[in-house]
Image (cartoon, grey):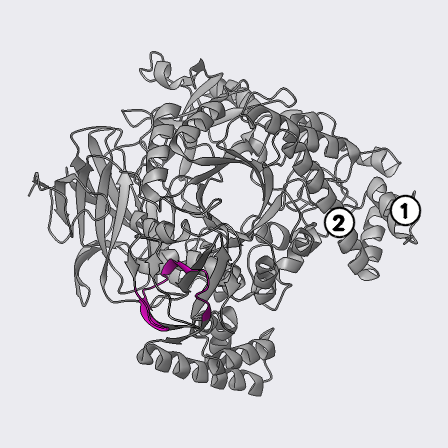
Amino acid sequence: MGLLMTSTAMGAGTGGAESGGRLLHRIDCTQDYPPERYFTNCSAGVVESGAGRYREGGPKAADRFGYRFSVERVGKPHVAVIRYPDDKRRYMCVMDSTTYDLSTGLFTNWAQPLSGAMHELRQIFWPRWRDCSVVFMSWGEGEPAAAASVEIWELDELAPLALPAKAPSPRRELGIQYEDPCGTGEAEGAMNREQWLDHLTEYALHSGQGLLVYPMVWYHGPAFPSEREPSGALDMAVARDRNQYLRWTTHPEDWYARLLKRFGQKGLKYRASLTMMRLGSLMQKMNTDIAAIKGGADTINNMNWNDHVQGSTGDWTPLYNVRNFNEIAKLVKQQGRVEPFGSKLPPFAYGETPDPANPMSPIFNPLHPVVQEALTEFVREIGARYAKYPAFEGVSFNMYASCMPWFGSIRSGYDDLTIGLFEKETGIHLPVDAKAPDRFSKRYDYLTRVCRAAWVDWRCRKVRDLFVKMSQALAAARPDLDVVITLWDETTIPGVLGMPLGAHQLYARQSNVDFFRDAGIDMALYRDVPGIRVDTPMGNSRDRGGHGAHSAGGVNTPIEEATMYRDFDYLDQESLDAAHAHAKPGAFIFNCWVEAWGKHVWSWPEPGDPNARELGMMDGKPAEGLLRINSEYPKDGFWWDSQLRITPGFPGGPHFLEPYAHAVAELDACRITRGGLFLDKAHTEAIQQFARAYRALPGEKFETVGATTDPVAVRTLQRDGVRYLYLVNRDYYPVNVEVTFNAAPKEVQDLSTGKKQTASDRWALTLGPYELRSYSLESNAAVAGFTTASSPDIVAQLTKDAESAFKTFADVRARSLMVPGLDTFEARMRAALTERRWAWLRRALTSYIVRKSRELSAK
């Protein structure tokens, strides 16, 4: 039972957006194949369901099955078309099990209704070898992987998406954002930087995403040859024989210049991402001598609420300084192999020493003049170096709990210098002995207990002033360069508060906007500051696994670990309103991933390693270090020993677009970026659909039409003699809309397609699931209002579920139990029901408060 080889051409109903292809293989997952073509480590069997026939893996975490197939032309774009059932709760990791080339993932149910149908996942990839594999792995307990079929198509090309030729300038920005720069040699089929850049550029143009936000600084300083700061670069690479390698250098080439030249030629934009935890010049000046500090010595390090000095970030990042790798490599050479996540390693560079008593927090005090000068002049260097490239837009600061330039939480910033400034500038004097060895904790107690409002406000203003300085330093090289502050939840909330518990839920803790204020960023202070914009975190899928005590718990995951991020993304109205108030709000959608490292090992390359010559080069220069790496797992029938199991998770079916629709409807977002570990290439058609409509709109806020934006938001803008109009559906089902004009427009043009149509003074249309539509019409055709009509069946079910929830709330109260925020939340649910805000109500019905109330009532 071999695999079917064909030469079928790709056309309508097969290839979709990726036209001009040829079918290489069709794998029917309900059929049996020999062990050289199929493996499983579980009782993967064929299931008959209303969605159709499919093969389902086992219910345990890491249960998996997979197929082996061949391609003819390495390096050409291909697409794997995977049909899977949306008929039960699942979390499925898809991968080739060695690289990131084919890696993606999906989850169904829990917060999203099941369709009972078969869906398609279309993963574009560039194979780096002819002998390929595709593996389906269950991530969570009771969330089995499943697939009905896999088709492998070879594509002629990835043609650039045709966008409106007469789009306004500047148009709204849609982009790709990376958190991690280490996978360039392990993703997109790339054997080197040039191949990676080729494939990244090709896909960006094909998907309609015109902006790349990519790390220029990651954890330990610049990845370009800075003249101010110690530099370093590292990445992982996979050879043609599937062996994996880690390589690094302290003298990186300036490949960013090549990227910017290429982007300038292709009409793409680049923004430098700065995950600014450490700069070498500051690490060299650290003073962590706590006795000396208590005796009055100056320090640029943060002093904390517990009388401890912050000498490390308190997170996972200290390892990733390439100077550490030089020392670890010596250990590897001595021992033959090292487990970097479990072995005793040499001391970290610069004497960085984690302190278990200190949480995830910035090492350096953002108000210290030495720190401010280092940051400001470093940003000035970036502007001066790259301003000559038109594709360069500016920088984006990633705000983790451990990043500069803020305090990270209310528990940092109690050093002598900061308190002296506060007393001088506010006139508030602390009744704390300025020489007491425990003065730092006493300051924390007084400031947070007595005058917290003044303390938080002052800190936020000082941090805002620093951002203004950095923005001005950047713009000194070119006035249009600006700063984006990217707020994060996944790398702040658990780092400061711990992994999600009942105490971390909506209304049990402060809103995100207040959490960020405590850390040093008050969104209200940035509403219209020239040269500075703020991006709000949105659409994080961490609730579905990867963190906490039950990271692969699946159906056994406690409610507390499975609701927090989504609730705050969609129901934290105070934070959403704060973001919407900005002149040009933005949103960042984080593609968080799950990882199963197994036994991760670094080893010395064997003598005569055939890959050492090619992979020992970084951007045309010899790497300083090269090690073999691998993750070892129990044997399960997979054909190769070289493995890696890391995949992002995305909501299945149409729900991939939910955070995009939410960002537009709730924020009127002028820019949206999405990404994480590597390029998402599994949702091309959805991104293209959104990009055509979104990037046709001017990059400024519109005027909201009517009194509600739920379930549909309608907004309009008059500009340059044209009236722009967009409509966006917040939810997963079609919604009928009737728009009323003061007078019938002569002509309405669909900006996605360029097609023109006539419309009366009452114009009816239907928006598909999470669909955005954008139009232009004559300037004097004012929009008077609109009405919507949702499916009666869905409305009836939401109403029924809401009434059931209200009865559950009453039962909880009758038992003298309390779910924090219950009264406020019920009032908001009743208002949503009365006002027919069905999208908000649906999300409320899957919230922690409703789920916890049901759990308590059932007991």
Q: Nearer the viewer, residue 77 or 88?
A: 77
Measured from the top left, where is residue 213 in percent x and y? Answer: 49, 38
**Circle 1 residue:** 424
Question: Quick check: can you spot residue 560?
Answer: no
Relative placement, left or right, of 808 versus 758 is: right
Q: Nearer the viewer, residue 246 or 267?
A: 267
**Circle 2 residue:** 461
Relative placement, left or right, of 135 versus 163 is: left
Please tell me which of labels 2 and 1 falls first in the chain. 1
User: Which quadrant of the structure image shows residue 803?
Assistant: bottom left
Query: What residue range appears in magenta?
Result: 758-783
Residue for point 89% across, 36% down? 295
Give the CA distance from mark 2 to mark 1.
15 Å
Residue for point 89% across, 49% down? 423
Q: Find out whether the residues at labels 2 and 1 contact each other: C-beta distance under 8 Å.
A: no
Vertical order, 145 against 628 (above or below): below
- Label 2 or label 1, whichever lies nearer to me, is 2
Measured from the top left, where is residue 365 in percent x and y? Answer: 74, 39
Measured from the top left, where is residue 678 in percent x and y? Answer: 40, 39
Residue for point 22% across, 28% down? 74
Measured from the top left, where is residue 464 in percent x and y? Answer: 71, 46
Vertical order, 551 against 707 (above or below): above
Mark 1: amino acid: Lys
Farthest top residue? Answer: 608
Question: Quick check: can you spot residue 751?
Answer: yes
Q: Quadrant of the N terminus?
A: top left
Mark 2: amino acid: Arg
Q: Nearer the viewer, residue 167 or 834?
A: 167
Circle 1: element type: helix
Vertical order, 797 against 480 (above or below): below
